[in-house]
Image (spheres, rainbow, N blue to C red):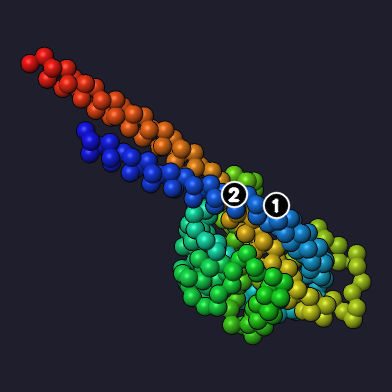
Amino acid sequence: MGADIKQLRTRIKSVDSTLHLTKAMGLVASSKIRRARSGMLRGREYADAVGKTVSQLVSCPECAKSPYMAKRQTKRIKLIVIAGDRGLAGGYNANVFRLLRDYPEADILPIGKRACDRFGGELHYAETFGYSDAKALASLLCREFAEEAYDQLGIIYTKYLSMMSQEAQLQWLLPLSRQEGISEHSVIFEPDEITVLNTVIPEYVAGNLLALVRESFASEVAARSFAMDSAGKNAQQMIDDLNLAYNRARQGSITQEITEIVAGSGT
């Protein structure tokens, strides 16, 4: 009985330490979520603005000659994979890597420490990824696409739906596709449409890349906050159950000692 009590006491201390850890990580995630969501919303606005301009440009027949609209027969795919900088975020990282399984032959450019650890290459932290990083990568990617180093460019990221829901998705960036329903005469571009399009594409890729990194980071923080809250609740429930078992074992031990004393005094 004494061994059971000692074992229960040790388990209670262990789970209590885990509870303190999950609470601390949950508080850190909660403190970051407002800034992360604000950055995500600003990124969305910028990407939408640049995207509208590009949509108007690709509607012009002349822009069909742009290398960024070339539909090639081969399908050499390059994927930017945005994962988290840390773990303990529920299925956040696992969902990203699960979606990547559908493209086993793709060339990977990782962002986020977990993705960089998995695929190698230069380390880019998702939390500190800024416009200068996006611009440098976009310039390189656009040059490689124009030189036909690959045929399709996409980004695997995590879309923020709510604090409790995030979804891994794939967004294709290149080649560009003409969208129906957009007037080609609504704006006049100088010197001409194709020149403006070829000039703005690196900015378009950089804007989308930065927006999706920020959205993924907001999703990571939300997923970690939710996961730590759930883990904290589970740890507290486990502590309550262990305390109940401990009290029962202790009460049984006391009852046994009393019984032995009473039995001894009667002999």
Examine the image and state in which quarter residue 220 appears: bottom right
The front one of 38 and 258 is 258
Using residue 229 as the reference point, say whether residue 71 is left or right of it. Answer: right
Examine the image and state in which quarter residue 241 appears: top left
| Other residues around mark 2 within 10 Å, as few (<14) / some (14–19) / many (≥20) | some
The image position of residue 9, as x and y in percent, is 33, 40
Amino acid identity at mark 2: Leu
Mark 2 or mark 1, earlier in chain: 2
128 in relation to 264, above or below: below
The image position of residue 227, as x and y in percent, is 52, 47
Using residue 36 as the reference point, say whether residue 233 is left or right of it. Answer: left
Q: Secondary structure at mark 1?
A: helix
Q: Secondary structure at mark 2?
A: helix
Q: Which residue is mark 1?
A: 34
Image quarter in which the N terminus is found = top left
Instruction: Let me know if residue 95 appears in the view.
Output: no
Residue at (79, 79) in percent of width and height: 199
Q: Which residue is mark 2?
A: 27
The label shown at residue 244 is none
